[in-house]
């Protein structure tokens, strides 16, 4: 159902395209304009960036707590964003602590804080709804897409015989219900088209296929009409936004090697992949020279565009599935795959590579935060009105440790969060306490989430 909030929002339309726009003052009555400029009335966004395989345990935590802290080596890419972040130590997802499995039980429930059930094949039970989907139930009706789920790895099926858990648990952190994992998009082109085009998978293309044209070319007549209604400041805002959309689309067009390579895999190659225990997507991206950093940033830029235009306020992004063995040899000084390197056995050479991989992940997180911070929204910016979580379900991949998880939260949540702090909570503080706090920050009135005990008053402004 389209609510009044959505129907009032301006769209650029053309054959095969539908582009949501950011808030433009010229298009709204004075009362609505004034209401939008009150910080407490601005839409709040939430995104979670999930990293598999944990971190170098001795290179994550800053030495000091409070506001007078220096970032650790892994967290250094966040230096310019120090006042925008909260580094939260001592947190644990208690329901992920099991001797049965090192990864799947620490991925599927990262945002549910419930214990997952040991199942087979396509049967799954995450224990409950995930944080992002609970938020989407409350605020998703105000946007075209209640939530967005993106990632880099294909979801894998079948049972991991080493631990007896279905691999489906390793491919999602978003759950509409305990038995309903959310589908996830891993192709930047598909993610872009679903956001900006009237795209229906499998539908026969029109005689003049709009998918072959630029999105902005398809709506150019609407753009010309709209510009006549806007003041100078709003014309500049519109130009900035449309340039960002165009930039992402051009980069997508330049990334021919981001396409699906499965059709190119011959039977002989499949046998060799099986012998080397490599997945098709891992081999294809490495062998064909896919720029993993660019692919990641395209996905993050699409999240930015969705938040900017208010097409969605909720998003999740998975850097990799459980036991992700993505090859990180594209980084200087790294020679191998993520999961293998995370089992470092305290080898200094492996630990050094592990740290470099962690550092790369934080660089991508910082990229997203800087983008959000650069976009003005009234007297603040998109990051001010967002809560962007980064974390892993493991502390140390070598020990599969779920204690003292690597957790960072960025953004002021519309002025409700006190950032610029490194806080060390009591050991085994439920991660769900953070989630309960974020729900309250979004004015979602729930008494408990997962195994939460209380809100984290120390992070509230």
Image (cartoon, helix red, strand yellow):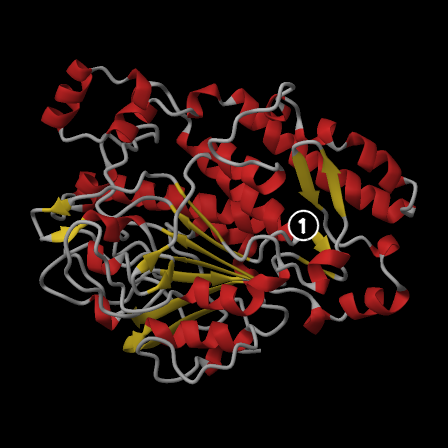
Looking at this view, is 371 or 7 the one in front?
7
Q: Work out whether residue 369 can be spotted.
A: yes
Q: Measured along the vertical axis of the image, is residue 440 above or below residue 391?
A: below
Q: Please indicate, yes or no, whether residue 53 appears anywhere in the rendered image.
A: no
**Of residues 159 and 111, the one drawn nearer to the viewer in this rendering:** 159
Count of marks overlaid on the render? 1
The foreground one among 393 and 350 is 393
Residue 169 pos. (x, y %): 24, 53
Circle 1 packing at 10 Å, graded few (<14), some (14-19), many (20+), is some
333, above or below 438, in the image:
above
Residue 12 occupies quadrant: top right
Residue at the spot 76% in from the left edge and 71% down from the top edge? 38
Is residue 145 rendered to the left or right of residue 105? right
Q: Position of residue 22 (x, y in %)?
A: 72, 50
* Quadrant where the C terminus is found in the figure: bottom right
- Closest to the observer, 156 or 4: 4
Give how far across and how far down residue 333 sits, in percent: 29, 31
Q: Residue at x 34, y 71 (%)?
A: 431
Up/down of 154 relative to 57, above or below: above
Q: Is residue 381 above or below residue 209?
A: below
Q: Which residue is painted at 51% across and 81% down in the image?
A: 445
The residue indicated by pointer 1 is 309
* Quadrant hosting residue 69: bottom left
Task: Find numbered disc 1 in the image and state the secondary structure of the residue it sits on.
Answer: helix
Is 139 left or right of 234, judged from the image as shown?
A: left
Q: Position of residue 217 (x, y in %)?
A: 73, 27
In what quadrant of the picture does the N terminus appear? bottom right
């Amino acid at each position: 159902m389209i609510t009044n909030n959505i129907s009032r929002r301006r769209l650029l339309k053309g054959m095969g395209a539908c582009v949501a726009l950011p808030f433009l003052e010229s298009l709204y009555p004075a009362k609505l304009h004034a209401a939008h400029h009150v910080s407490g009335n601005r839409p709040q966004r939430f995104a979670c960036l999930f990293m598999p395989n944990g971190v170098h345990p001795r290179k994550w935590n800053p030495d000091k707590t409070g506001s007078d802290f220096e970032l650790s080596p892994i967290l250094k890419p966040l230096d310019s964003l120090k006042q925008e972040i909260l580094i939260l130590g001592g947190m644990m997802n208690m329901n992920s602590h099991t001797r049965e499995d090192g990864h799947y039980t620490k991925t599927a429930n990262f945002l549910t804080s419930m214990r997952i059930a040991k199942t087979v094949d396509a049967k799954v039970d995450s224990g409950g709804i995930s944080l992002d989907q609970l938020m989407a139930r409350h605020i998703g009706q105000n946007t075209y897409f209640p939530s967005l789920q993106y990632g880099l790895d294909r979801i894998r099926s079948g049972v991991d015989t080493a631990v007896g858990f279905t691999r489906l648990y390793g491919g999602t952190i978003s759950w509409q219900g305990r038995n309903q994992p959310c589908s996830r998009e891993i192709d930047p082109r598909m993610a872009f088209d679903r956001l900006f085009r009237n795209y229906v998978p499998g539908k026969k293309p029109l005689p003049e296929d709009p998918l072959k044209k630029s999105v902005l070319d398809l709506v150019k007549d609407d753009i010309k009409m709209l510009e006549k209604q806007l003041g100078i400041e709003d014309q500049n805002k519109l130009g900035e936004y449309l340039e960002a959309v165009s930039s992402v689309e051009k980069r997508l067009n330049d990334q021919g090697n981001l396409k699906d390579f499965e059709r190119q895999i011959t039977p002989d190659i499949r046998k060799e992949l099986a012998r080397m225990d490599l997945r098709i997507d891992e081999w294809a991206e490495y062998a064909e020279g896919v720029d993993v950093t660019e692919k990641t940033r395209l996905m993050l830029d699409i999240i930015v565009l969705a938040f900017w235009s208010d097409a969605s306020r909720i998003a999740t992004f998975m850097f990799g599935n459980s036991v992700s063995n993505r090859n990180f040899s594209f980084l200087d000084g790294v020679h191998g795959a993520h999961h293998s390197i995370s089992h470092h056995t305290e080898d200094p050479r492996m630990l050094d590579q592990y740290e470099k991989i962690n550092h790369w992940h934080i660089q991508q997180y910082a990229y997203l935060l800087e983008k959000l911070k650069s976009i003005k929204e009234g007297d603040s910016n998109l990051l001010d009105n967002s809560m962007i979580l980064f974390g892993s379900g493991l502390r140390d991949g070598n020990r599969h440790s779920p204690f003292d998880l690597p957790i960072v939260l960025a953004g002021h949540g519309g002025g409700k969060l006190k950032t610029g702090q490194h806080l060390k909570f009591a050991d085994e503080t439920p991660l769900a306490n953070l989630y309960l706090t974020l729900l309250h920050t979004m004015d979602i009135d729930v008494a408990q989430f997962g195994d939460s005990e209380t809100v984290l008053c120390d992070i509230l402004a």
